[in-house]
Amino acid sequence: MSEDTTGHDGTKRARAKPVAAKRFITIYQASESVAEVAEKTGLTVHTVSQRASTYRKKGVPLKAMPNSGSTVRNDWGELAELARSLMPEGATTVASAATEEE
């Protein structure tokens, strides 16, 4: 394997060193967030989440923890109103499933 990898945004970053399963589980269970696990292991947040999901599917009982630290849900009505308020006058919009059903 190469030393570098190209991310989804086209930037190169050093490939993380392998983390043994027992070490990953020990760090995961002692951490407060997925971001903390990523920091301690050198893996990306995405990789930590994927690996934890795989382990759970294999029967490993990993604790639940916040993924990104943000648990705020989007208020779609509020976001739609914001988008409408920022829409330039005379601009057209793309019809969505929600507006087509109304």
Image (cartoon, rainbow, N blue to C red):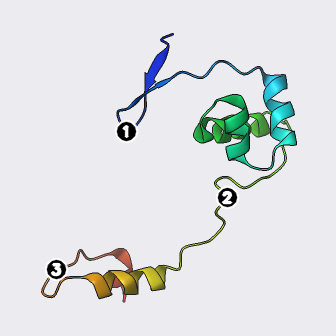
Determine which residue is flagged by label 3.
Answer: 92
Q: Nearer the viewer, residue 95 or 7?
A: 7
Gap in Å between the C-alphas at discs 1 and 2?
A: 22 Å
Secondary structure beneath dot 3 equals: loop
Percent x, y of residue 77: 46, 85
Q: Quadrant of residue 54?
A: top right
Q: Which residue is mark 1?
A: 9
Most foreground residue, 61 or 69 = 69
Q: Pick out the residue farthest to the top.
A: 1
The earlier-in-sequence mark between 3 and 2 is: 2
Q: Are marks 3 and 1 in contact (CB under 8 Å)?
A: no
Looking at the image, residue 68 lies above or below residue 44:
below
At x 54%, y 74%, the residue is 74
Q: Amino acid at mark 2?
A: Gly
| Nearer-N-terminus badge (3/1) | 1
| Residue 93 falls left or right of residue 77 | left
Q: For the C terminus, give its image quadrant.
A: bottom left
- Image disc number at residue 69: 2
User: Considering only vertical position in the picture, is 14 above or below 50?
Assistant: above
Q: Amino acid at mark 1?
A: Asp
Report how far apart the C-alphas of labels 3 and 1 lie in the structure.
Answer: 30 Å
Is disc 3 surrounded by few (<14), some (14 to 19) or many (20+) residues within 10 Å? few
